[in-house]
Amino acid sequence: MIRHIVFFTARDAADLDRIRAGLETLASIPHARHFEVGRNLHADRLTGAEVDFVVYAEFDSEDDLAAYKAHPTYARAIEIVKPLRDMRIAADIVAS
């Protein structure tokens, strides 16, 4: 299983709802075993990083993850979110 974790920071706090809505469109892509978008609680002040949203998804295989990223809805979500975000960090790990 592949765990796909992505962190987003908004360029402007006024756009938080639009970013969340754009990210939530990804839930309609059928290749994920599990998908969620969560608002960061900002509980960890050690790093000073102000991540606003976390996308967490699980895929049965790297092929499923690749199909997810190739889906037209994924491209549309990028069109919506990219101009509104300041930072994006993604990680894909194999679950043990």
Image (cartoon, rainbow, N blue to C red):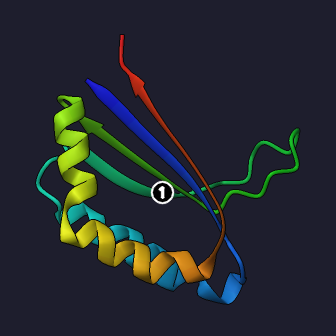
Q: What x and y, as percent, mark residue 26?
A: 28, 64
Q: What x and y, as percent, mark residue 1?
A: 25, 23
Q: From what the image shows, is residue 15 above or below residue 59?
A: below
Residue 58 falls in which quadrant of the image?
A: top left
Of residue 88 and residue 18, the one placed in the foreground of this image is 88
Amino acid type, residue under disc 1 in the picture: Gly
- Residue 33 visible in this rendered orientation of the protein: no
- Residue 4 visible in this rendered orientation of the protein: yes
Residue position marked by numbered label 1 in the rendering: 38
Name the residue at 37% across, 20% down: 94
Name the residue at 51% across, 49% down: 6
Of residue 62 and residue 39, the one placed in the foreground of this image is 62
Left or right: 31 in relation to 44: left
Left or right: 59 in relation to 55: left
Within 10 Å of disc 1 (Cα), the crowding (few <14, some 14-19, many 20+) is some
Name the residue at 88% across, 49% down: 48
Local secondary structure at mark 1: strand
Q: What x and y, as percent, mark residue 34?
A: 24, 43
Q: From what the image shows, is residue 86 above or below residue 30?
A: below
Q: What x and y, as percent, mark residue 4?
A: 39, 39
Q: From what the image shows, is residue 89 above or below residue 93?
A: below
Q: Quadrant of the C terminus?
A: top left
Q: Which residue is the extreme one toward the left?
A: 30
Q: From what the image shows, is residue 65 above or below residue 13?
A: above
Residue 23 falls in which quadrant of the image?
A: bottom left
Left or right: 25 in relation to 33: right
Q: Which residue is the extreme one toward the bottom?
A: 14
